[in-house]
Image (cartoon, rainbow, N blue to C red):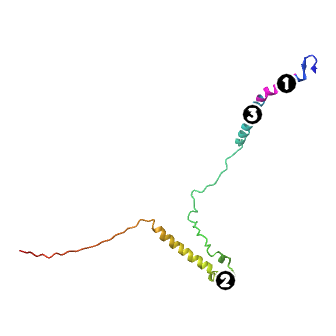
């Protein structure tokens, strides 16, 4: 199949189109990259513009800070008896009965005391120790002369 007047076949046209696309691909990428850079730069610069009628807002500041004496440090919340904050006498009674009659809690407390004592005893070996001893002797000898 030939194109009249040019003497080119269909394969020649396809080859030329493919080679033109290959040659123009880097050029298209460069143009696309430039377009992206210009767009991003224009967007960034437009974000910096405040406007011609911008006026700095006035902020009334006191001459000195006067609240430093009013603050008191908050004491930590007492969480060991949190249920008492609910102010429910029935709940308080139930918890007191549970603690008093619960041998597991008493056993756990005893085990904790035992573990703490054992820890103190074993950690004592890690500290330097001082040992001392003393002795006194006194000798008297008889002053006799023979002669």
Quadrant for residue 90, please give it: bottom right
Q: Earlier in the sequence, mark 3 or mark 1?
A: 1
Q: Are marks 2 and 1 in contact (CB under 8 Å)?
A: no
Quadrant for residue 79, please give it: bottom right
**Magenta stretch: residue 139 in it?**
no
Q: Secondary structure at mark 1?
A: helix
Q: Secondary structure at mark 3?
A: helix
Q: Main secondary structure of the magenta part?
A: helix
- Residue 15's disc is 1
C-alpha span from label 3 to label 2: 78 Å
Q: Earlier in the sequence, mark 2 or mark 1?
A: 1
Q: Quadrant of the C terminus?
A: bottom left
Q: Residue at x 82, y 27 (%)?
A: 21
Q: Are marks 3 and 1 in contact (CB under 8 Å)?
A: no
Say whether residue 28 is left or right of residue 94.
right
Q: Secondary structure at mark 2?
A: helix
Name the residue beneath numbered marker 3.
33
Name the residue beneath numbered marker 2.
93
Give the farthest residue toward the left: 147
**Magenta stretch: residue 13 in it?**
yes
Say whether residue 84 is left or right of residue 28.
left
Give the farthest residue toward the front: 147
Q: Are marks 3 and 2 in contact (CB under 8 Å)?
A: no
The residue range painted magenta reads 12-26
Q: Residues within 10 Å of mark 2 (few under 14, many from 20)?
A: few
Say whether residue 99 is left or right of residue 126.
right
Q: Residues within 10 Å of mark 1 (few under 14, many from 20)?
A: few
Q: Between residue 142 and residue 36, name the one nearer to us.
A: 142
């Amino acid at each position: 199949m030939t194109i009249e007047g040019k003497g080119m076949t269909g394969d020649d046209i396809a080859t030329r189109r493919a080679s033109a696309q290959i040659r123009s691909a880097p050029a298209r990428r460069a143009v696309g990259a430039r377009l992206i850079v210009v767009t991003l730069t224009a967007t960034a610069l437009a974000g910096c513009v405040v406007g011609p009628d911008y006026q700095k807002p006035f902020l009334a500041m006191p001459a000195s800070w006067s609240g430093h004496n009013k603050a008191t440090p908050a004491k930590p919340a007492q969480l060991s008896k949190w249920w008492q904050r609910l102010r429910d006498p029935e709940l308080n009674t139930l918890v007191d009965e549970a603690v008093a009659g619960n041998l597991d809690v008493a056993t756990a407390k005893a085990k904790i005391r035992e573990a703490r004592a054992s820890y103190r005893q074993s950690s004592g070996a890690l500290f330097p120790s001082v040992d001392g001893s003393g002795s006194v002797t006194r000798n008297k000898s008889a002053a006799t002369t023979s002669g």
